[in-house]
Amino acid sequence: MTRKILISGGLSGGGVATHVNLLCKLLLQDSNQITICATHSEWDPNEVDELQQLGVRVLLPRLGAAESLLTWPLRLRRDFDVCYCVGHGRIHDLTRTFLSKAGTSVYHEILTAPTFGVMTQLIPKLDFVVANSKAIKLELQRHWPNKVIRVIPFLTADRRVNPPLHRPAAGGRELRVVYLGRLASHKRPQKLIESWEALGSRPPIGPARLDVYGDDRDPATLLRLRTFVLERGLESRIAIHGSYPHSSIPNILSTADMVVLPSEWEGLPLVLVEAMQHGVPIVATAVGGTAELGENNPDVIVTGAAWEEFVSGLERMAEKVRIGSINAQRLHQWTEQRYGFEAVGPLWIRALMNSSSFFSQSRTA
């Protein structure tokens, strides 16, 4: 049975963009009708065009959010089967009104505690909630104990990722350390870059090069980081690459020795899951659901949020990489079983195609 699905606020950047793009393509396979309503877009226009060419209807105001309030009630009928609300924002209070009488609303958390205030009034009005990780589910349940919440990770791919090649010992060669993702302050890319002159030169981390991929909503962030590298003559040891298409991730990861993320808070970072799927070990701070990536996983190091603990984790991972104790195939298999397409894709289909049945299952899931 085909469904009429409204995705509310789905044009955010980062992992949200990857997930929503893949989700639309997955749902279109069953001829569902999909409409995306967003008050702004962080996507590359070509990505929006691609979805539109596939049949997704995208309503994106040209004159600001006020246009949405005025025009969407005229352009949309109240006949949607599901309203999938991605992330925080008052937009969901409007889009949920376009549901049919039997329709259901599904809220998907993206960020953590800093955004709870915005959603305090809205979440009780929505039917069900999806959390990216067990840790975030527990936090949401603490705020809304009567809400039905299920854990479903982001989609990272549209098929099973092929197993990676064996990773030989790095020995004493230069390591390639990679940061992937938005250059948001809470992810601490600036501190990582400012510390790299010392970190990347001393064993066991050094000799090591840092490659930073990603940008920020504020264009000045990228310029500031590049200026820092140039002024200190660190171009041979730090490269600030800027934004990157999702399709380039396999190529970026093919030569990476590790992916790092020293965040102060997170949901469940998609870039870490993608790295692990490709057999690349990670070092990350145990914030949000990130700690779950290290459960019974010897090829991952998750540290405390303190900077000194993160640096210690970097050193331990560098030792592992240099002696060749990382098993890329084991890491890939661990990740695919929990976060791969075959594990996650069916959950999203059930959650949006048969919401009432899916969310009525055990609340411990």
Image: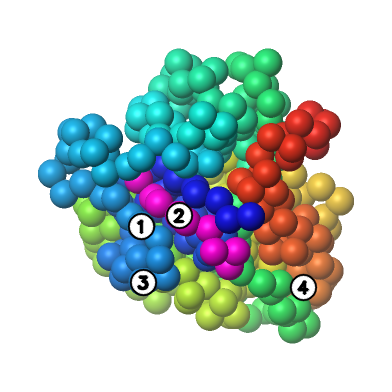
The quarter in which the C terminus is drawn is top right
Q: Are marks 2 and 1 in contact (CB under 8 Å)?
A: yes
Identify the residue position indicated by label 3 in the image. Answer: 53
Give me the C-alpha separation between circle 2 and circle 1.
6 Å
Identify the residue position indicated by label 1 in the image. Answer: 57
| Figure check: 132 above or below 55 | above
Q: Three-letter amino acid code at disc 2?
A: Ile
Give me the C-alpha separation between circle 2 and circle 4.
37 Å
Q: Which mark is residue 34?
A: 2
Q: Three-letter amino acid code at disc 1?
A: Arg
Whichever of labels 4 and 1 marks the residue nearer the N terminus, that label is 1
Give me the C-alpha separation between circle 4 and circle 3.
37 Å
Q: Three-letter amino acid code at disc 3?
A: Gln
Foreground of the two, 330 or 126: 126
Q: Position of residue 168 (x, y in %)?
A: 76, 82
In this view of the protein, can residue 303 be seen by the observer? no
Q: Residue at x 58, y 67 (%)?
A: 29
Q: Position of residue 162 (x, y in %)?
A: 71, 79
Whichever of labels 2 and 4 marks the residue nearer the N terminus, that label is 2
Q: Are marks 3 and 1 in contact (CB under 8 Å)?
A: no
Q: Are marks 4 and 1 in contact (CB under 8 Å)?
A: no
Instruction: Reply yes or no: does residue 288 show up in magenta.
Output: no
Q: Residue at x 47, y 69 (%)?
A: 246
The quarter in which the N terminus is drawn is bottom right
Identify the residue position indicated by label 4 in the image. Answer: 328
Give me the C-alpha separation between circle 2 and circle 3.
12 Å
Whichever of labels 4 and 3 marks the residue nearer the N terminus, that label is 3
What is the span of residues highlighted in magenta in the rendered image? 29-37
Question: Crowding at label 3, few (<14), some or many (≥20) Cα neighbours within 10 Å?
Answer: few
